[in-house]
Amino acid sequence: MSDKDDEKSFREAMNDVRPLSGKKSSKTHLGESRRPGADIPDSTLRARRRAAELDKPSAGAALSEAWIEPVDPEQPIAFSRPGIQHTRLRQLRQGVLPIQFQLDLHGYKIDEARELINEFIQASRYRGLSCVRIIHGKSHRCKERQSTLKSHTNHWLKQMPDVLAFCSAPQSEGGTGSVLVLLKRK
């Protein structure tokens, strides 16, 4: 069914619908009129307005949650952008590149982990680091494989333009419970 067919069907279904008559009211359940925020001091309202104006959505919120591909706890993960040298990828997979910084996500919730990963990648890039490690764990105890930090980490890192490549760490560096990340140079 096309969009035009959907719209036509919707309009036909809504043909007999009429808006409710009457005026919107700001009356309370007792019938008395009340202005919004009447019992809140003006200084508090001004402070809230200033905070709302300054409040910016976090960059981590831009990372998609649409559909997360489930990753098995023991499954190695890997990703690379086109144009990355094979030698560099092999060095990353073998753990030859020195790990300059790391983030441990054990104990964090999914939303917190998203923010932390975003801030960690930005801070690492700002510091001029090229190889970092993120320890996400394996989530053996989780019954829903799809909600693991490993699955989310795999999904989010692919969305970050500063990430050139990543792969599961060698066994000596954390194995499939952590990921080595190769970052763009500053």
Image (tube, grey):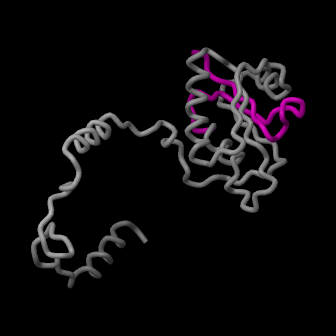
Q: Any magenta on residue 16?
A: no
Looking at the rendering, in which quadrant would you find the N terminus?
bottom left
Vertical relation: 152 (above or below) 118:
below
Q: Nearer the viewer, residue 150 or 104?
A: 104
Residue 3 as seen in the image, left or right of residue 22: right
Residue at 27% x, 38% y: name it: 47
Return the x and y of residue 176 as percentages of the image width and height. 82, 41
Vertical relation: 31 (above or below) 65:
below
Residue 5, by quadrant, is bottom left
Return the x and y of residue 138 as percentages of the image width and height. 79, 47
Q: Nearer the viewer, residue 21 or 154?
A: 21
Residue 140 as seen in the image, left or right of residue 16: right
Return the x and y of residue 65 as percentages of the image width and height. 55, 51
Q: Which residues are magenta?
A: 158-186
Vertical relation: 156 (above or below) 2:
above
Residue at 81% x, 42% y: name it: 76
Looking at the rendering, in which quadrant would you find the C terminus?
top right
Return the x and y of residue 71 as percentages of the image width and height. 74, 51
Residue 77, by quadrant, is top right
Vertical relation: 59 (above or below) 67:
above
